[in-house]
């Protein structure tokens, strides 16, 4: 399978254009003028108070994988929630909203986003020791991403479980042998 760099849609290997947005597959981005280019977006939930079981809160976040860094930015409450609450209608609403958000993300100036929001976490690729994608199982109902860096270890719960297969393919292409994905 081939994933569109514009909208993230899964396409067959022999496709020339994306079936969702019409973007030419395998085409590199136009000259970005020094801006970082978005490679992948992952909607996650992040428990900032992991040791504190009372009052534990999962924060909705987005992991933006660019060509240079990972940015942990503010997330979307709708990711995963609409499907849980609304079945088929909720899934349609969620997919439309998230597709629009992914298209908008390709125009973000990530350095500007980070300088305007002190809560944005920047993880440079050279600081990453490993990234492990843990698959959903009977005993682990949600797929996880465990990220080890030179400073901190992070653990995220993937909000869009159905995109695990996509992430298992795209993240190793971005980070190389630092990624271990359960298949």
Image: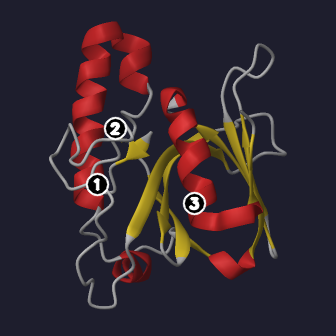
Which residue is the extreme one toward the top? 87
| Among the two numbered marks 2 and 3 on one chain, the one whose residue lies closer to the N terminus | 2
Q: Residue at x 70, y 81 (%)?
A: 126
The circle drawn on residue 173 is: 3
Dividing the picture into quadrants, the one containing residue 144 is top right
Asked whether the beta carbons under mark 1 and mark 2 sit within 8 Å of each other, the answer is yes
- Tell me the SS state at disc 3: helix
Taking the image as shown, residue 36 lies to the left or right of residue 160, namely: left
| Mark 2 → mark 3, Cα distance in angstroms | 17 Å
Residue 182 coordinates in the image, percent (x, y): 75, 37
| Mark 1 → mark 2, Cα distance in angstroms | 9 Å
| Among the two numbered marks 1 and 3 on one chain, the one whose residue lies closer to the N terminus | 1
Taking the image as shown, residue 123 lies to the left or right of residue 149, namely: left
Q: Residue at x 23, y 58 (%)?
A: 104
**Closer mark to the observer between disc 1 and disc 3:** 1
Which residue is the extreme one toward the front? 14
């Amino acid at each position: 399978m081939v994933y569109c760099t514009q909208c993230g849609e899964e396409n067959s290997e022999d496709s020339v254009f994306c079936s969702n947005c019409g973007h030419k597959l395998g085409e590199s981005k136009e000259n970005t003028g020094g801006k970082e280019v978005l490679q992948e977006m992952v909607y996650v939930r992040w428990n900032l108070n992991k040791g504190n079981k009372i009052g534990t809160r999962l924060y909705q976040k987005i992991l933006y994988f660019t060509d240079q860094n990972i940015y942990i930015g503010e997330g979307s409450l709708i990711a995963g929630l609409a499907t849980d609450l609304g079945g088929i209608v909720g899934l349609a609403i969620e997919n439309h909203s998230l597709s629009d958000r992914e298209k908008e993300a390709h125009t973000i100036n990530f350095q500007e986003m980070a300088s305007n929001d002190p809560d944005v976490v920047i993880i440079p690729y050279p600081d990453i020791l490993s990234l492990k994608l843990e698959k959903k199982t009977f005993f682990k109902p949600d797929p996880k991403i465990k990220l080890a860096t030179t400073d901190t270890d992070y653990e995220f719960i993937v909000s869009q479980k159905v995109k695990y297969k996509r992430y298992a393919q795209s993240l190793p292409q971005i980070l190389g042998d630092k990624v271990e994905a359960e298949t």
